Amino acid sequence: MLAECARSVPDLAIEVTEIPTISQQSALLGARVDLGFGAVSTQGVPDATIVREHMLDDPLDCVLIACDHPLAAEERVRLDDLASLPLLFSARDAHPSFHDQVMQRLQRLGLRSPLDTTYQSLHLRWARAAEGKGWCLGFRSQRGHAPKGTVALPVDGLLVPWGMELSWRAGDDRETVRTLIASFRRAAAVVRRTPVFSDEVV
């Protein structure tokens, strides 16, 4: 999206600000940002003053472990296989409903790993997994592009819906905002046309 805007609207100045998904609505309402791009699963209560548009699906359906872990050469794993390693995940108070959804699913699949909620950041969890300090959940898109030092392994029965959505203030019809929305839509359409993994999980 940024590359397209740089080519088609070179005079458009875009500033990217990292804001957690759960804080994006207040940032939009406070006019600190004009567009939000965040996770569908962790959005708060719908607000009529905010427009939301689904962009991408990227379910959690695999786990990330260190490249040098004995299981790294396997095609698939079961959660039982990972029982000796802690699960690196966020604390419940960060996203209660999503946390409960994920943990219930993992428990149905026989989760026996201890839970380590020390690392709230996704990037920190990926780094710790690469160091062999535990395992974490991975997105379908990471199966072909796992974070450095990790491998992404599918897990039978693991499928937690996840995706990304674009949000903006209702009634904001400025040309700049319309341009960015259109660019996001085109970029998302390109990603959706990209072939995905064909092996389905139940």
Image (cartoon, rainbow, N blue to C red):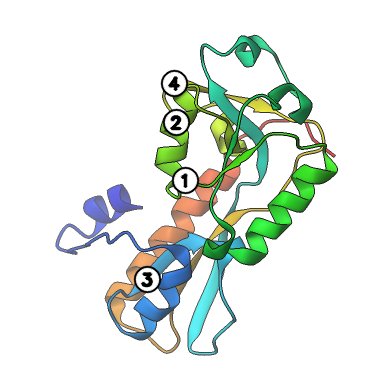
Tell us which disc is closer to us: 2 or 1. 1
- Going by the numbered disc 3, the residue's amino acid type is Leu
Disc 3 to disc 1, C-alpha distance? 30 Å
The answer to whether 33 is drawn above or below residue 58 in the figure is below
Which sits in the foreground, 108 or 58?
108
User: Residue 64 appears at what percent x and percent y?
Assistant: 57, 29
Indicate which disc, 3 or 4, sits on the residue closer to the N terminus.
Answer: 3
Indicate which disc, 4 or 1, sits on the residue closer to the N terminus.
Answer: 1
Quarter of the figure that contains the C terminus: top right
Label 4 residue SS: loop
- Going by the numbered disc 2, the residue's amino acid type is Arg
User: Residue 161 appears at what percent x and percent y?
Assistant: 69, 53
The answer to whether 107 is drawn above or below residue 164 in the figure is above
Which sits in the foreground, 151 or 108?
108
Disc 2 to disc 1, C-alpha distance? 11 Å
Disc 3 to disc 2, C-alpha distance? 31 Å
Locate residue 100: give its quadrant.
bottom right
Indicate which disc, 3 or 1, sits on the residue closer to the N terminus.
Answer: 3
Circle 3/circle 1 CB separation < 8 Å: no
Tell us which disc is closer to us: 2 or 4. 2
Q: Residue 149 shows which numbered tag?
A: 4
Disc 2 to disc 4, C-alpha distance? 10 Å
Residue indicated by mark 3: 35
Residue indicated by mark 2: 128
Q: Residue at x 31, y 51 (%)?
A: 4
Indicate which disc, 3 or 2, sits on the residue closer to the N terminus.
Answer: 3
